Image (cartoon, rainbow, N blue to C red):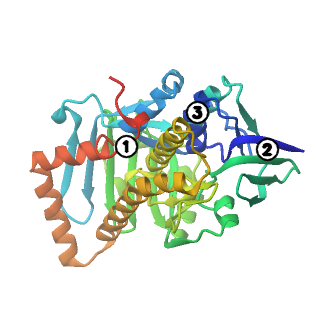
């Protein structure tokens, strides 16, 4: 059976669901497909995966009427950030009070973000949620794209959006290639309870093996992201709790006091990947389907949300001009808007990763000097903070402050 839609989104994660929320008020008939329903939110345990949400992304969630839901669950502001090099005495400290803002951003569990957005989608009668199912094939003609799902269901749509992650099936079926490389590292994630309070400060140390970040998510509780070589990550993940906490304490130090408890651990591969194209006729890629980035600055989901907000702007403009939302000329506007910004951020994060990964003496000396000099230049620090908050640049309408 063929169901006619205006838009089919493959992937109901944070980015795909945000796009559906942004466009649902337009009245477009939208189907969003995923392999599984949103993960359940635990009252007693924190999600293994969290995101550092910029102020621009918070603006998007507020505009989508999803932020209140998140606040009713769990969100944790961070007002300061400290970064230092374990191979020297260079460090930099950011304090939002220096620029007169309330916070630098928020740490929010991925499951809470996804559930908030999907809950919002259920309030629209023009949005259909389909899971568990997956795309198996599609065919594009001049007027529509016909989509085959693994269940045998067939959809016909004006536009197909791939929001299905770094291993995107939509991208592969489109024949869109990627460029990039593996970092031969994995990110180890878990939740840690410490004797000292984080005082709403995010902290990150650059170790010879890779960055280790502590992100505040509750009283005396942080979510960590530890970049390690593949073998080291698996070994650390398999240690008993006492041995793991000892290794973590040695790597991070005592700025948060003693490491007391650790929750379940998981690892995921780290890579840089960028699609050569974001769009074809009637096809668009957003989020990790278009670009994957090293997590050292926590910008991956924010780039994806910016993609969703920008594509929503482009589609809304096309609707107002009575243009075909799947036309290549329309979709190219989205690609031109986002590709340059994404490439800039990806290059910056890759550069930082390589700069802090080098153990050559001249490099370690220069980067420590650079951290110290930057820390002493208030105007430069203020610029960096505002950039990190997502308050600069060519923002989509949803990302701009509402007041």
Residue at figure coordinates x 36%, y 58% from the top left: 345
Image-quadrant location for residue 126:
top right
Q: Is residue 59 left or right of residue 269?
A: left
Q: Is residue 48 left or right of residue 37?
A: left
Q: Kindly identify which residue carries mark 1.
A: 258
* Spot occupied by residue 333 in the image (x, y as percentages of width and height): 46, 53
Image-quadrant location for residue 24:
top right
Image-quadrant location for residue 198:
top left
Which residue is the extreme one toward the front?
Answer: 322
* Spot occupied by residue 236 in the image (x, y as percentages of width and height): 53, 60
Q: How many marks are shown on the rendered structure?
A: 3
* Spot occupied by residue 18 in the image (x, y as percentages of width and height): 55, 38
Among the two numbered marks 3 and 2 on one chain, the one whose residue lies closer to the N terminus: 3
Among the two numbered marks 1 and 3 on one chain, the one whose residue lies closer to the N terminus: 3
Q: Is residue 371 left or right of residue 162?
A: left
Question: Marks 1/2: CA distance?
Answer: 43 Å
Which disc is residue 132 wearing? 2
Question: Marks 1/3: CA distance?
Answer: 42 Å
* Spot occupied by residue 23 in the image (x, y as percentages of width and height): 58, 34
Judged from the image, the secondary structure of the residue bearing numbered disc 2 is loop
Judged from the image, the secondary structure of the residue bearing numbered disc 3 is helix
Q: Kindly identify which residue carries mark 3.
A: 21
Q: Is residue 134 left or right of residue 210?
A: right
């Amino acid at each position: 059976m063929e169901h006619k839609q205006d838009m089919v989104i493959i992937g109901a994660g944070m980015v795909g669901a945000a796009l559906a929320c942004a466009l649902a008020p337009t009245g477009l008939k939208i189907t969003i497909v995923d392999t599984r329903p949103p993960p359940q939110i635990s009252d007693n345990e924190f999600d293994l995966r969290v995101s550092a949400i910029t102020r621009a992304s918070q603006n998007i969630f507020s505009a989508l009427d999803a932020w209140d839901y998140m606040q009713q669950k769990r969100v944790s502001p961070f007002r300061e950030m400290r970064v230092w090099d374990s191979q020297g005495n260079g460090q930099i400290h950011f304090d939002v009070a220096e620029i007169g803002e309330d916070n630098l951003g928020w740490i929010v569990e991925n499951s809470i973000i996804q559930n908030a957005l999907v809950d919002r989608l259920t309030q629209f009668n023009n949005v259909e949620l389909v899971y568990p199912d997956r795309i198996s094939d599609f065919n594009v003609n001049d007027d529509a794209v016909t989509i085959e799902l693994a269940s045998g269901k067939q959809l016909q749509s004006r536009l197909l959006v791939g929001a299905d992650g770094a291993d995107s099936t939509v991208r592969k079926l489109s024949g869109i290639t990627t460029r990039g490389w593996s970092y031969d590292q994995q990110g180890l994630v878990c939740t840690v309870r410490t004797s000292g309070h984080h005082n709403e400060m995010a902290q990150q140390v650059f170790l010879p093996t890779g960055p280790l970040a502590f992100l505040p998510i509750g009283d005396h509780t942080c979510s960590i992201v530890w970049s390690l070589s593949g073998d080291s990550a698996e070994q650390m993940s398999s240690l008993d709790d006492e041995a793991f906490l000892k290794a973590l304490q040695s790597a991070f130090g005592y700025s948060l006091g003693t490491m007391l408890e650790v929750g379940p651990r998981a690892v995921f591969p780290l890579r840089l990947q960028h699609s050569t194209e974001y769009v074809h006729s009637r096809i668009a890629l957003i989020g990790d389907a278009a670009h994957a980035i090293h997590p050292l600055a926590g910008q991956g989901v924010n780039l994806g949300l910016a993609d969703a907000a920008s594509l929503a702007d482009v589609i809304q403009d096309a609707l107002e001009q009575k243009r075909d939302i799947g036309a290549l000329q329309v979709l190219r506007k989205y690609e031109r808007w986002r590709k340059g910004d994404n490439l800039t951020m990806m290059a910056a994060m890759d550069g930082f990763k390589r700069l802090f990964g080098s153990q050559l003496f001249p490099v370690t000396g220069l980067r420590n000097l650079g951290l110290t000099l930057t820390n002493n230049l208030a105007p430069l620090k203020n610029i960096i903070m505002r950039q990190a908050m997502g308050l600069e640049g060519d923002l989509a309408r949803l990302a701009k402050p509402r007041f």
